Image (spheres, rainbow, N blue to C red):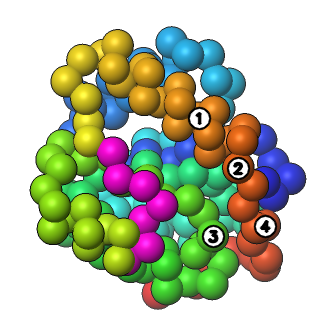
Amino acid sequence: MNGHEHSIFLVDDDEDDCLLIRDAFLEIHTGTKLVLFATGQDLIDHLTTLSEDELPSLILLDLNMPMMNGYEVLQTLRANELLQCIPVLILSGGSYKNAIKECYRLGANAFMSKPSSFAELIGILAETHAYWLKTVRIPSTVGTAPDLR
């Protein structure tokens, strides 16, 4: 990746979903740091403070959030040269054809529906972790703290 231990940033305004995802990652013992954000704006604000080595390996993004929705977050990330190579996976409660198409059009790397059981969630996150953080390689980002404003 870019020379740091793996971290995943989860952006979801649903506290229960965040806790379930956190518990699922603990269950699969990835050793990956999971950082939670309740809003897209919180994520953007935090990213502007990070050095290259502190950028996440992966972003899991919900679509339906107040203030700045997932589409807007995705557009902001993809418009920034320093952040556009970070894989962004949509993890949404719905799987509507138009939403899926729009996410890919805006540059999402994957679209996943939130599963209905904890066991399914563990399976999806284990596969996600193995693929995105162990199997594939992404270009390193260059520079210092990104300017998203």
Tell me the distance, in whole angstroms, between the alpha carbons under discs 1 and 3. 17 Å
Disc 3 secondary structure class? loop
> Which sits earlier in the primary sequence, circle 4 or circle 3?
3
Q: Nearer the viewer, residue 67 or 110?
A: 110
Q: Is residue 129 left or right of residue 44?
A: right
Disc 1 secondary structure class? helix
Q: Residue tagged by mark 3?
A: 85
In the image, what residue occupies the spot 25% across and 62% down? 100
Amino acid type of the residue that numbered disc 3 sits on in the rendered structure: Cys
Tell me the distance, in whole angstroms, between the alpha carbons under discs 4 and 2. 13 Å
Image height of 139 relative to 89, above or below? below
Amino acid type of the residue that numbered disc 4 sits on in the rendered structure: Ser
User: CB of mark 4 within 8 Å of CB of mark 3?
Assistant: yes
Image coordinates for residue 57, horizontal then vertical, percent: 65, 51
> Which sits earlier in the primary sequence, circle 2 or circle 3?
3
Amino acid type of the residue that numbered disc 2 sits on in the rendered structure: Val
Is 108 included in the stretch rendered in magenta? yes
Q: Residue tagged by mark 2?
A: 136
Residue 34 placement: quadrant? top right
Disc 2 secondary structure class? loop
Q: Residue tagged by mark 4?
A: 140
User: Which numbered tag is attached to residue 129?
Assistant: 1
Tell me the distance, in whole angstroms, between the alpha carbons under discs 4 and 1. 18 Å
Is 135 included in the stretch rendered in magenta? no
Tell me the distance, in whole angstroms, between the alpha carbons under discs 2 and 3. 13 Å
> Which sits earlier in the primary sequence, circle 4 or circle 1?
1
Disc 4 secondary structure class? loop
Q: Which portion, as a residue range, is magenta?
A: 106-112
- Is residue 32 visible to us here? yes
